[in-house]
Image (cartoon, helix red, strand yellow):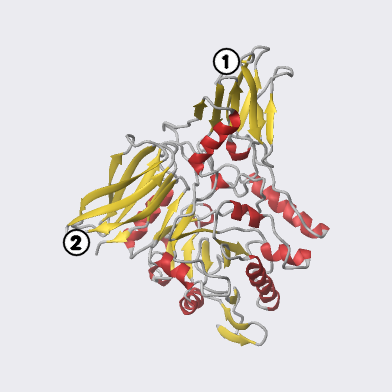
Amino acid sequence: MKGFAIDKAKDVMWRDVARAWQKYEFGGAMNTDRVALRARNRLALVETEGGSIAFFPPPHKFFFAREIEVNLGYVWYRKDSESAFSVGVRQADHEEAFKASGVSDEVWTRRSNEARHNAANFALYNAPPGTWQRMPIYYYLSAEDGEATQRAVLAYTHEDRYKAMPGYQVAVSHFHTHFNEQLQDNGTIDFQPTWLPTFRALGINIAMMSDFHGDGHATDPGPLRLKDQKVYFDGCRRHSDRSFLIMPGEEPDVTLGGHYTMVFPRPVYWTKVRQAGQDAVEQNPQYGKVYHVGSPADELQMLKQEQGLMWQAHPRTKGSSGYPDAVREMEHFRSDRFLGASYQSLPVDQSEKRLCEKRCFETLDDMNNWDGAKYLIGEGDTYMKHPDDETYPHLMVNYVKLDRLPKFDEDWGPILRSMRAGDFFVTSGEVLFRNYGVEGTGARRTFTAEVEYTFPLEFVELVWGDGDKTDRQVIAATEFAPLSSHRFRVPFDASGKKWVRFAVWDSAGNGGFTQPVSLR
């Protein structure tokens, strides 16, 4: 937006990454280029004597699935002349590496190389030729001062927190923070990592981590890996709390093909190597039961015995290109231990009305047409994070139905059983379900959902499959006021339908969706 009069404006103001208020009053020389602001919450404001204007990008769909969340500066100002200035939003031209750390030159060099690897992964945005790309910027006008306007805008993202909902716990998964190495580097499991306060500030209750992905002794047949696992488990136990549980998951990627995430209802010792003549399960005098996985059958047997769950990470892209399609006939996929696939905004295509419209939802619908109940699980798939990062835009989360959060040394089975039953919904945070379900029997049924939302709604949809193809009913929802709630009732004919799911999408591309419900 151009043409702001400097003599009418007081300043451009924003909060920096440390949450301190900053401002620029246009007393300096003219700018040649845009001045990118590393603003907290992706938000800056023009403040005048008569009020203020906030400007910001959509909170999620503007962003793509980077592997790190360094704040690259998404809003900007430019002093165009001695009398006028401009403001707007932007995408950065390049990535920046995260802050590497290490107690030795060897470790610091390895982690610096990994940081540079992440910096190179900056092309997960796609605008197919011939498509109309919807690339909005939001302006919020107010008669109040900048700080009051900032508070009003943050209501649309619950202040970049995942709002607590009665009867639910907020779960995230798939993070490579090298937690086990951090603890060993510092010589104490009481070391507090920077990712922990970052998660807690977002309102997350359950963090399913994924160590041993380029770190630790992932492929060691026993002594080194088991020692690493003990540190991993002890650290997760030490830093879990009454309202925050760290579950030591993993992305093993060893026997099945593609990438996949794996979690258990308790700490489980296992190796990714089964040596000649070695039993699949042994009793270790130091660690107790230890599994040695040398084949898909070994892995599936471990999942069944320990009641673990697995799902395809980033299906049909990256290291899972061609998956889960390639394993749809395998015993793994047919097992109830195979929960489904991950959901994350990757790649971003602004011609899509939904987050990850084609890749993610086509995978979900295909899986349920192929087989029994399979679900999408909100994941991060990111590396180290710090409190000054912009983590909120890059996360999709799971609201899991739970009466209470288990403590670390209790059984985490209620979490996995609720997920296995499909008793969770996925959201970017702005659309929340208070309750939902299918009413009625026989052919005449109704999907009901009580929905809470912030941005103005765009549409809701009922999606179903018959075991072969997928169809949907899309209902416009633009008449509903923002920052409100509504109980939707969508009658449908269940004849010939195998499953049904419901989703809500707003004007910024944010959304929430329920898992497929079987009708047979």
The residues bearing labels 2 and 1 have C-alpha atoms spaced at a distance of: 61 Å
> What residue is shown at x 52% (from left), y 63% (from top)?
261
Left or right of 117 in this view: 371: left
Residue 90 locus on image (x, y percent): 58, 31
* The C terminus - image quarter: bottom left
Residue 33 locus on image (x, y percent): 67, 23
Within the image, what quadrant is residue 367 found in? bottom left
Provide the residue designation for mark 2: 441
Q: Looking at the picture, which amino acid does disc 1 mark?
A: Gly
Q: Looking at the picture, which amino acid does disc 2 mark?
A: Thr
Residue 508 locus on image (x, y percent): 45, 37
Classify mark 2: helix, strand or loop. Answer: loop
> What residue is shown at x 70% (from left), y 17% (from top)?
30
Residue lying furthest right: 105
Compare residues 472 and 369 and report the one nearer the observer: 472
Classify mark 1: helix, strand or loop. Answer: loop
